[in-house]
Every structure is written in structure tokens, then in C-alpha cells.
Amino acid sequence: MIKIYSVLRLPIFFILLSILSFNTVKASHNAALDLIYEYTGTPNEYKVSLKFYYDCTSSTSLGSTLTIDYDSDLKGSSGTLSLSLISGPLEVDQPCLPGPTNCQDPNSPYIGIYEYVYEGTLTLPSKSTDWVISYTSCCRNAALSTLTNPSSQDFYVSALINNTDAPENSSPYFQALPVPQLCAGNHYDLSQMAAEKDGDSLRYTLMEAEGGPYPGVSLLSSYISPYTPDYPISSSSGFTIDSTNGNLAFTPNLEQMAVACILVEEFRFDTVSLVWEKIGSIKRDMEMIIIGDCLDDSKQYYLTVSPDPNNPDSLVEAACMDTLITIYTSDSVQCGSIATDGSDFRMLNPNGYPIPVVAANAVNCYAGYTNEIQLHLASPMNQNGTYYIWTKKGYDQNSLITFCGFQLAEFDTLTIYVDSCPDLKIDLRNVTVVNNDSIAMKWNLPTNAYPMVDWTVIFKQYNIYRSLLPNGFYSYLGSTYGINDTAFTDNTVDVQTTAYDYNIKVELSNKYTSPSSDSIQSILLTCGQNTIDSTKIDLAWTEYWGWTSPTYEIYHATTNGSWTLMGITNNTNYSFDKPVDANDYKVKVTTSYQLNSSESLISESNWCEYNVPLYKVVIPNVFSPNGDGKNDFLEFDNLEQYKNTQLNIYNRWGRRVYQSDNYKNDWDGAKLTGGTYYYILEFTDGTIKTGTITLLK
């Protein structure tokens, strides 16, 4: 696994805050409340913290102390606790606003939020499973658009302590700050994940807002339709919460101010009763402000692999065979926007072939944001050279989503360099048809351009691949397993109809697979249409690229006879005269290459087969040896197919005037006078033909 480090700007607690001009509102400026507790180590004693978020439109500030209530119905006991201000007012960061807030500039239309933190130590008087600590403040913001008459509704938050079943338990606490001011039209995977240091299980649910005083009054009936606790804001994609991590998913489509309440329940497995027991809970009550003029922060985001912020595109070296890559973004993105199937990213190897990214996950995700992403590759980086990774819109219909809810631009590219692979190179030497029914190939032992790795020690096998198209899609065919076993025969072919293309890869035991060797295609010979009466055969064949500028030899033979060279050409077609002898014949094309003084390579094609039938001898009845070039010889058609045929010619008185033991249509009767003569034609099989022939002069 590689890690590629980056310098990045860390946003403050990942809070998205922005604008709504509620300057005419004169009611409460309460924005959010968090109430948590932590066991101090002393029985029944807890440090209680209240975080109060207050907007800057108020002309007053909170006091130095606040009072919370605690109560147990089971014990019939209650009391109050004074909390002291330990920090604040501190304005929270608002990186998505296009200008300063009214905390910084009283004339600014952009609302800022102050955080106040109060703490105190609570000692519970007894053990009970239902201690509730709570705080009530008057009142809610009059600008809320999802509750009726909000300025008359109290702001209430509570937490549950079970010091009977879990006396040493501390509550979870939210990592992300509340009061998100979000951008209309942008999609959000807004984390409300809480940290839990005791290792207990947490369950997240949406609940109705409550008012005070303790134990809190449900405001369910105050929600304005269509809003509900489960649908607290207007969203084009619905509003959901992940019960396992508190992630809120939605796409706000209206500028508005709403209230959302999140309940986090804490469970612990009892090994005696074998049931899950509820040992505590906390609640967050917060405003959600949706605005229309957020600052588009996507322009400042980019992928980076460099530790130098001034040189973000510099190459970074990676180890050979890595399948895990950790990349970084210049600023944090929403963890929930990272497509877990890896489809937000594309990758190419040094040869330009894709390496699928099959998974991606956020690393060190805090409060729903991260700048570190781990990519899982379908195959290892097994070649030396430069690899390219770039962003794309994934199958989740978005690319990475920025801090302010904008999508990262597609095709932001970074580069990774690998130079530690063996870099084996294989030369496929030859591909040839064998006996008209199979194809054999040979290759050289691989050479290693980077001898830092002794590949012979970790050799595993040679893999053979085949394609039905020149340089087309290759499928695995088979393997050889000896380091010197550099030959393979393919018996699953139809050499009469198809030319097959092959290449080789070497695989090592460390999962390295070399790039493909050069590819070579077998020679496919096709014979033209040849009628029985044709005297020529037209041949054509596929080009052989096993070596440069091949010369082709054309051979023919009888079915069981030896091969005879018919001709030589540099072209991929040839026409030759058929033999005259009646027989079954075959023809093939070969090409050869002289490797050295003692070794040559030969590649041959499939065979074309044809037949020359035995024709009957046609006997003429007249010839005219007058030197005009026409019918000057006594010619018997098809006689060339019959060897050692005897011919005897007699005159009318029975005297023999010509004799041949192997007649070849070459008698012109020049010394004879015109007239009628008698012939006897005797074949080697004993057949005799007789008749008369007229000689004209």
C-alpha cells in the first residue's frame, strides 16, 4: 500500500454557515443546544457541559452562569445545577460566506454564530436508571418557517443518565458543530456522528422539537405541513438519517430556516441477561439555515499527491504491485459523497489501458469530512512508468462534494510513477499451423530491463492469450509452467476458416504479470473458385507479421506425396498452373526467417486441397502438317495424363510408318504423302484404341 502525502488547509470543525437576513426579527437569537456529561471517576459524579450557540444579531450576550435541571421520576428526586462560562463568545468559522458576518461588521447582512461553553460538576443523590438533565431557554427564533408561532416556543435540550446499569458511563458527544447554514440546490451528506469513548453502540433517530420546562413538551403539533420531525426542511431528494452513523442526506431546494432534532441513544450488551440495555442518550436541537448565495468553494479544491503545496502535480513514486493508493484533496470533502464502488475515479496504466478502481473509502473521516481517500485497484500496478488518476461523476450521480456542498470538477488529474517492477519483455518468435489441424507458437526467455529483481527465482508461469481479430480482445488460452517451456500448441482451432492472433505474458509468484508480448497472427490461406475444367488456382492469404518483409513460398503435393516448391512471391496472392496428372493435391504457403547460421524459423499456413480428375483421351480424325501453325501435329487431347503410351502408325498397305513408346503429341508426318493412315494407341494398363487418321497436305 502506498501513501501520498499532502499539505492541506483544515477547516474549523467542518461547519457550513451562511446568510439569511433576519434583521427585522426581534425575538430570541438561540440557534442550537448540546448537553453532554462525563464521568469524573468519583461515584455518581459527572462533569456536565452545555454548548450554547447564539447568533450575532442580538444586541446582548449570554451571562456568566446558566442553570440546568436534573430529575428522576423513579426516585422522586430533582434539583438544579449552576454551570459557569468557561469559553466564549467565540465565533465559529464560516468558510462558505461570500463576505464578513455581522459579528465582524455590524452592517453586514451575513449572520454570524457565537459559541458559549458552560461547565459544572453534578453529584447525583442516588442511583437510578432515569436521571434526566435538561436545560430550557426562551425562546425559538421567530424566523423559523417550519413551526407555528416559534417565538412562543421554548428551546429545550436533555440527556439521560443511567447510573444504575452503567455508573461509570460518559455520554457520547457530537463531533460536528451545529447550526449548518447550507446552500439551496446542493446535495449534502451531513454528518452528525457522535464520538463514544466507552465503546458502546449508538443509534441515531430524528425526533420532534421540544419545549420546556422539564420534562419537555413535544412540539409535534406545531409543525407546519408538509414538515415533520422526519422531514424538517424542504428537500428535492427527501431527508434521511443513517441510524448507524447519524449521516443526514438531503438536497435543500428552498431558502428557509428550519429546526432539526437528533436523538443519540447509547446501548450496552449485558452478558448476564443477554440483552441490549439503554444506558444513556443525548439530544441535539439545532437550526438549519438554507441560503441561496453560498460561496462556490469547488474552484479551490484539487487532488494532490505532493507534499509541496506550490507543486501539487509533481510525480510521486509508488511500489510495484501496489493495489491500494491513498490520495488527498487540497481541502476536506464530504465523506458521504465518496462512491464506495470507486466510480468517482478513473485510472490508466503507462500503456493507456484502464485499471478499474473497484472501491474507495474515506480515511480519518472526522465530523463527516476528510481529505484522505483510499482507492482499491482491480489489478496491481505492475508496469514501470506513469499512471494517471482523475475524478469523474460516479454511479452515485455526483463527484466528490466539497465543504460547501459543491461538486468537484471532473477530470482533475494526478500522476503516480512506478519504477521498481521487473519490467519483463517477451518476444513471441513464431506462430505456425501444424499438420493442417493445430497452431504452434514459440517465444524467447523474457529479458529484464530492471535487473534489481531476479525474476527467475520467483517465476510462476507463462500465460498464453488468443484473439480472433488482429490485435483484438484477447482471452486466456492456457499456461506453461517451466521457465524454459517456451512453446505451446493450440489444438482448439479451425485453421481452415480463421486466422488466430496470439500473445504471451509471464506471471511471477509475487503476483506480478508482465506486459503482453508482441502479437503474431497465423497465416490463413484461402483458395479461389476452381472449376473442374480450370487450369489455374488463385491463392490469397493473410499477411504474416512475425518478421519484417516476409517472402512467401508456395508448395504443392499429392495427398501422400512430398511437397514441391511451385513459386516465390513477396505478395499475399499467387496464381499457378494445376498439375496435369490426375490425383488429389494440396497446396500451402510458408515463410521463413534465418535466426543464425544454425537455426531458422518457418511459419506455414493451412492447406487448400483440390483434385485433378482423369480425362478420356480424345482422338482426332485429321491433321494438316503444312507449317501454318494450326493442327500441324497429330495430337490426342488429354494424352499428357497417360504416361508411356505407345503409338504405331500404318499405311494402307500395312507397313508401319511411325512408332513411339512414349508418345507426346509430337509427330507431324512430314515425310508422308497425304492420305488415310491406320493407328494403334496402346496404354500401360493394356487398353488399346485403334482407328484411322487422315493426313492432309
Image: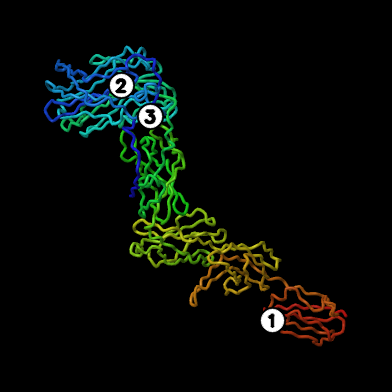
Vertically, is 610 above or below 258? below
For the point 14% across and 28% down, which residue is it?
167
Q: CA distance from mark 3 to mark 2?
A: 25 Å
Which mark is first along the chain, 1 or 3? 3
Residue type for callout 1? Asn
* Picture coordinates of residue 559, whole percent (x, y): 58, 70
Q: Secondary structure at mark 3?
A: strand
Q: Is residue 132 visible?
A: yes
Vertically, is 188 above or below 542? above
Vertically, is 68 above or below 516? above
Which mark is first along the chain, 2 or 3? 2
Nearer to me, 269 or 660: 269
- Identify the disc placed on residue 530: none
Q: CA distance from mark 1 to mark 2?
A: 123 Å
**Crowd class of label 3 (few under 14; some 14 to 19; many from 20; radius 10 Å):** many
Q: Quadrant of residue 233?
A: top left
Nearer mark to the viewer, of 3 and 1: 3
Q: Quadrant of the C terminus?
A: bottom right
User: What residue does disc 3 label?
Assistant: 249
Residue type for callout 2? Tyr
* Picture coordinates of residue 24, whole percent (x, y): 39, 15
Q: How is the image coloured?
A: rainbow
* Picture coordinates of residue 244, whole percent (x, y): 30, 31
- Identify the disc placed on residue 54: 2
Q: Is residue 180 left or right of residue 607?
A: left
